[in-house]
Amino acid sequence: MVLSLFKKAEIQPPADVEAASLRSDRFRLERESDWQRLESIVTALEKNRPRSISDDDLLELPVLYRKTASSLAVARETSLDAATLDYLESLVRRAWFQVYGPRIGLFGWLRRFLGGGWSASVRAIWLDICVALAVMVAGTIVGWLLVEQDERWFYSLVSGGMAGGRVPGADPETLRETLGTAESSDGLGIFAAYLFSNNTGVCILAFALGFAFGVPTLLLLVHNLALLGAMYWVFADTGMGLDFAAWLSVHGTTELGAILLAGAAGLHVGRTMAFPGDRSILAAMKGAGVRAAQVMAGCTIMLIVAGLLEGYARQLVGDTPSRLAIGAVMLVIWVLYFALMPAPQERET
């Protein structure tokens, strides 16, 4: 290619340029048949046509990949022409995905994830879930007791924009209207939207702060559940505690479940860092990170489900028994899924 450019311009190329071009051409000619063979195999696999590949070619795929990768290393060391380098880099990258890349696509991964991968990761961090659950229950009780002892605590725990008119001493009829369905739930809709966005942020923070040995995660869970306890006291003080619990349970058993799992995932990472056991911290964190990431991926699904329940079921169902039934059914579904869904079988290699 370089020589042809000099010929068109009728310029005599320097000796070193001519030597480099000849060396590049010779290098390519000696190995080009293997590259082309590898490219044809990779192309057939990318097009999902493995039957068009002969048995010999399929068995030679790893060998051809290593030869081409070696050619790329030599090409880089000897500074061959850019076109050859670009071609080899692209071919090696494509071949790598066929030799070492994942064997399943997105839907296959999702089927494996929902078919036991997620539940297995959740069961693996059961101790952290127990700790997070105890902290969340304690936080709710603390919020309740603080407001019960001194109503001024409510304004420290719950922001004014979130509380609106739902404050200690509010008119019972006003509070009851906020528990209505779509036609009369504008007031509490603000609270619901705040809860959803707030809890999504809490899930992310609860997991991320776990890297500080889990201590900030515990504090975050206490604070956010104290907020819920304070709000619950406002309704319970007017005799509508069950109604508020029913309203919250429609999406709350799913949404608070996501917070619980996110907090437990953060605690799992922090606990592993603090107590790696006989392994090194990096080795211990590798397994903990995979499990925590699986749990957090599932939390995203739970938050989406909670958003649908909050946007539709809670708005359409207004009576307390039905709302409690929906919340209880969702709770049972999640508990049974995490407890009984078997772990996926490892594929034989």
Image (spheres, helix red, strand yellow):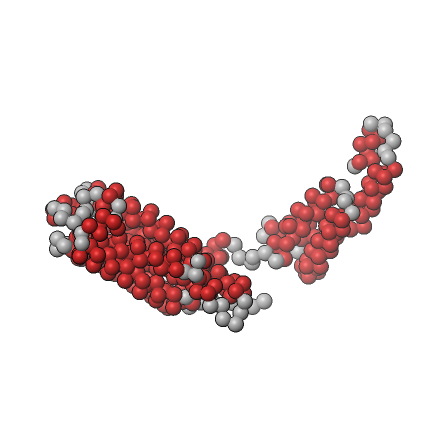
Q: Is residue 230 left or right of residue 83?
A: left
User: Residue at horizontal 54%, vertical 63%?
Assistant: 282
Q: Is residue 115 left or right of residue 56?
A: left
Query: What percent of the width, then of the height, locates residue 225?
Result: 28, 56
Is 327 in front, or is 260?
A: 260
Query: What percent of the width, then of the height, locates residue 211?
Result: 45, 58
- Residue farthest to the top? 9
Classify the position of the N terminus by image quarter: top right
| Res 163 visible | yes
User: Residue at horizontal 26%, vertical 53%?
Assistant: 227
State how many labels appear: 0
Q: Tell me the quarter of the picture where residue 226 sits.
A: bottom left
Q: Is residue 249 left or right of residue 209?
A: left
Classify the position of the C terminus by image quarter: bottom right
Vertical placement of residue 195 versus 328, above or below? above
Q: Tell me the quarter of the picture where residue 133 sits.
A: bottom left
- Residue farthest to the bottom? 278
Query: What percent of the width, then of the height, locates residue 180?
Result: 18, 47
Is 141 in front, or is 28?
A: 141
Query: What percent of the width, then of the height, locates residue 247?
Result: 22, 53
User: Residue at horizontal 72%, vertical 45%?
Assistant: 85
| Res 299 visible | no
Q: Is residue 173 left or right of residue 141?
A: left
Is 166 in front, or is 104?
A: 166
